[in-house]
Amino acid sequence: MNDSATPSGALANPKGYKFPGGKYTIAHWENFLLTDCTTSAQLPDKLVHPVALFHVPILGSGVNIAKLFEVCGAEGPGSVGLDGYDWEYFNNLRIDIEYDVQGSIIHWENHVDENGVGYDAMKFQIELRDGNTLAARITNSWRFRRGGYKQALVAKNADEATAQPLATFPEFHVDGVSAERMKTMAAILRDPYRVHWDREATTEMGLKGRVINQGPLNLSYIVNSIHSFAGPGSVRRLTVAFHRPVFDDDVLVAGGEVLSTADGATALKFFNQATQAFEFDSSQTFNEPGNYALRSAIETAVIELINKGERNGLWKFKESALPVLPKSDVETIVKEK
């Protein structure tokens, strides 16, 4: 860290800047609103939606997004980009548990992109512990563009995966990205970045007033697709590269392909309405073998189909209607019908 600068302002070289650290407990209301922003159903067993690993580590470590922008000298709307995430889940996060949170900036390097625009590449790493047990670790990569950045917001095509898929994930559809959910997400994240909620800021950037969806929300659609395949609590690591922004009212389809089941590794593609990949995500799920995850996904789909039929009046259960049927009852009810 540059000794000539102080933590209250921009540092010439923030590498080594240590966050104050602290404690963080994820409240029910917070997780409820966060999960609602992802358009997913609420998760069972007090499970926290995996995309909470964006804001919980930052806030728990005693900083916030505004402070990171200040320390790294962000220049204005459009000057900050997300290069990628590497999130490791050693245990599932749950509400009402107090986590100890510590972190620091571990990398800072000057670069020039393909358009000749200078930027500083920054990485910070934060760990969450439940007592002495490491619960999660994040390594986030951001870039801070320097001058000329307003015309540098150019979409880049994602690299295509070359391996042949073994199976395909169920698609997760977003029929129009909601600007209102972006505002709620900004409040949850304590995110002052105007491009997510201020149409005047994006108009100044030449984006015709369309606001930009948060990276964690883009990632959440992929996570929701994973959950529909392998179940809640299945994600153990996410590594993500961002290639282009998502705007309000964009129609999205998130899906994935299983490339390997030896260790549960999967590779996912994220598509927009024109089926052009704009994000490529690599994810690992370790707690379920591939064949069990597939069976679980099929059972879940059958259960939902039976419940939907009951709700639509196509049949009735013997006893009072149940919101969710035990998996052991599926075969019996199908046969009786």
Image (spheres, rainbow, N blue to C red):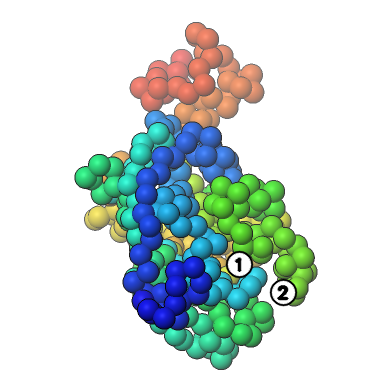
Judging depth in this view, the residue of 337 and 9 nearest the camera is: 9
Q: Is residue 8 left or right of residue 128?
A: right
Q: Is residue 216 above or below residue 208?
A: above
Q: Is residue 285 above or below residue 116?
A: above
Residue 264 x, y percent position in the rendering: 29, 53
Between 70 and 113, the one lying in front of the other is 70
Dot label at residue 205: 2
Rendering quarter of residue 102: bottom left
Give the amino acid at mark 2.
Met
Q: Residues within 10 Å of mark 1 (few under 14, many from 20)?
A: some
Q: Which residue corresponds to the image point at 37% horizontal and 42% vertical from the top-left?
A: 93
* Res. 247 image quadrant: bottom right
Viewer can see residue 205: yes
Dot 2 lies on which element? loop
Of marks 1 and 2, the one in the foreground: 2
Q: Is residue 276 left or right of residue 332?
A: right
Q: Earlier in the sequence, mark 1 or mark 2?
A: 2
Instruction: Write down the residue under mark 1.
Output: 245
> Is label 1 in contact with label 2 (beta carbons under 8 Å)?
no
Residue 185, percent from left and from top: 59, 50
